[in-house]
Amino acid sequence: MASQYLQDEHADADIKLYDTQDNAYLDLTSGRVRGMMSDKVTGTDWLKTEAGSGYEIKGQEISSDDDAMGIAFRKGDPLVAKFNAALAELKDNGTYDQITGSYFGTSSTAAAQKSSRD
């Protein structure tokens, strides 16, 4: 999703794609790139590390219907219905938002840039 968004919205930018998230972080911390895109969970987690401590989230959150997560079950598993019901209840009563806010925060990792480069 990130690469397609960048190609569509910032075609004039020099876009570099990476085979691993770690390689992207290495280029960011070494100064070979000025910013990067990451998914929210991974990026927020990295910002809490020593390597990520000098960086921050910039820009608006970018999302689409395609960036949802899923959980795999065996076909026909009766647990699916129970899981879906429990998840719906958590969303309805606000617990889901409370949990995701607590663990993942509310800010985006659409672009993490070194603070001094603003």
Image (cartoon, rainbow, N blue to C red):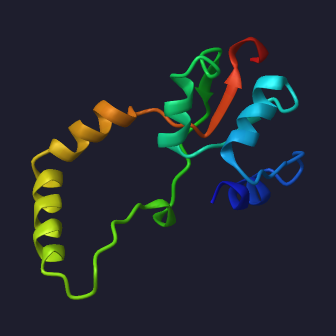
* Direction front: furthest residue: 74
In terms of image quadrants, where is residue 7? Answer: bottom right
Q: Nearer the viewer, residue 31 or 117?
A: 31
For image coordinates 24% across by 39% down, the residue present is 99
Q: How many marks?
A: 0
Q: In this rendering, is residue 25 above or below 56?
A: below
Q: Quick check: 37 left or right of 68?
A: right
* Direction bottom: furthest residue: 76
Q: Position of residue 41 (x, y in %)?
A: 47, 41
Q: In this rendering, is residue 114 above or below 82?
A: above
Instruction: Indicate the quadrant containing the N terminus: top left, top right, bottom left or bottom right.
Output: bottom right
Q: Nearer the viewer, residue 49 or 12?
A: 49
Q: Quick check: 80 left or right of 55?
A: left
Q: Position of residue 117 (x, y in %)?
A: 78, 17
For image coordinates 18% across by 53% down, the residue present is 91
In terms of image quadrants, where is residue 112? Answer: top right
In terms of image quadrants, where is residue 114? Answer: top right
Q: Position of residue 50 (x, y in %)?
A: 59, 16
Q: Position of residue 82 (x, y in %)?
A: 10, 70
Q: Quick check: 36 left or right of 97?
A: right
Instruction: Indicate the quadrant containing the C terminus: top left, top right, bottom left or bottom right.
Output: top right
Q: In this rendering, is residue 26 above or below 1?
A: above
For image coordinates 70% across by 49% down, the residue present is 20
Q: In this rendering, is residue 83 above or below 11?
A: below
